[in-house]
Image (tube, rainbow, N blue to C red):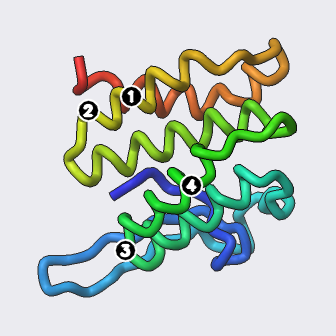
Amino acid sequence: MTRPRARKNADGLGGFSVIDPGGNWIRVFRDPATAPMPATTPAGRLAKALANAVVQADSRGSVGQAVRILDSALARPQADDDPVEQVEVLVYRAELAMVLHDPKTAAEMLARVQSVTLTEDESERAAPAFDNAAELAAPLR
């Protein structure tokens, strides 16, 4: 199971899925009446790739397809890519590597996170992703 993330196929609400031993999917979301308004639709190329990967992995259980989406986006860096989105994509890719029991790839993605140059404002925006990265890195040490 991965961390709860906003899903574009759930009106931007954050949630997660659990699969019980019988193969039943249980989807857990906040009550839309009490949930904060979701962020705007992803605008950047990497944000769109991340949103699509979340749907594939967390909603459909297709971790392999999510990996392909993220790897494809990361393989074609563009000058106008938002560095915060790049950090978020790398951290989610590391998380998926852990789901696939691939600690080597997870460590590589987390190392790439550290090499992304951010301004002070971007560092603040990326703080939740860095927190997730620190949690992911702990068992890799």
Q: Quadrant of the N terminus?
A: bottom left
- Give me the C-alpha separation between circle 3 and circle 2: 22 Å
Query: What kind of element bears circle 4?
Result: helix
Identify the amino acid type marked 1.
Glu
Which label sits in the foreground, 3 or 2? 2
Residue 72 got which mark? 4
Q: Earlier in the sequence, mark 3 or mark 1?
A: 3
Q: Earlier in the sequence, mark 1 or mark 4?
A: 4
Provide residue 93's location: percent of width, then percent of height.
46, 46
Query: What kind of element bears circle 1?
Result: helix
Q: Is residue 81 left or right of residue 138?
A: right
In the rendered image, the residue lying farthest to the front is: 76
Which residue is the site of mark 3? 61
- Give me the C-alpha separation between circle 3 and circle 1: 23 Å
Whether label 1 touches label 2, CB < 8 Å: yes
Provide residue 118's location: percent of width, then percent of height.
75, 17
- Give me the C-alpha separation between circle 2 and circle 4: 19 Å
Whether label 4 touches label 3, CB < 8 Å: no
Residue situated in front as seen by the camera: 134 or 113 = 113
Query: What kind of element bears circle 3?
Result: loop
Q: Quadrant of the C terminus?
A: top left
Q: Is residue 88 above or below residue 100?
A: above
Q: Residues within 10 Å of mark 1 (few under 14, many from 20)?
A: some
Which label sits in the foreground, 3 or 1? 1
Provide residue 63's location: percent of width, then percent of height.
37, 65
Residue 104 got which mark? 2
The quadrant holding residue 22 is bottom left
Q: Earlier in the sequence, mark 3 or mark 2?
A: 3
Residue 108 got which mark? 1
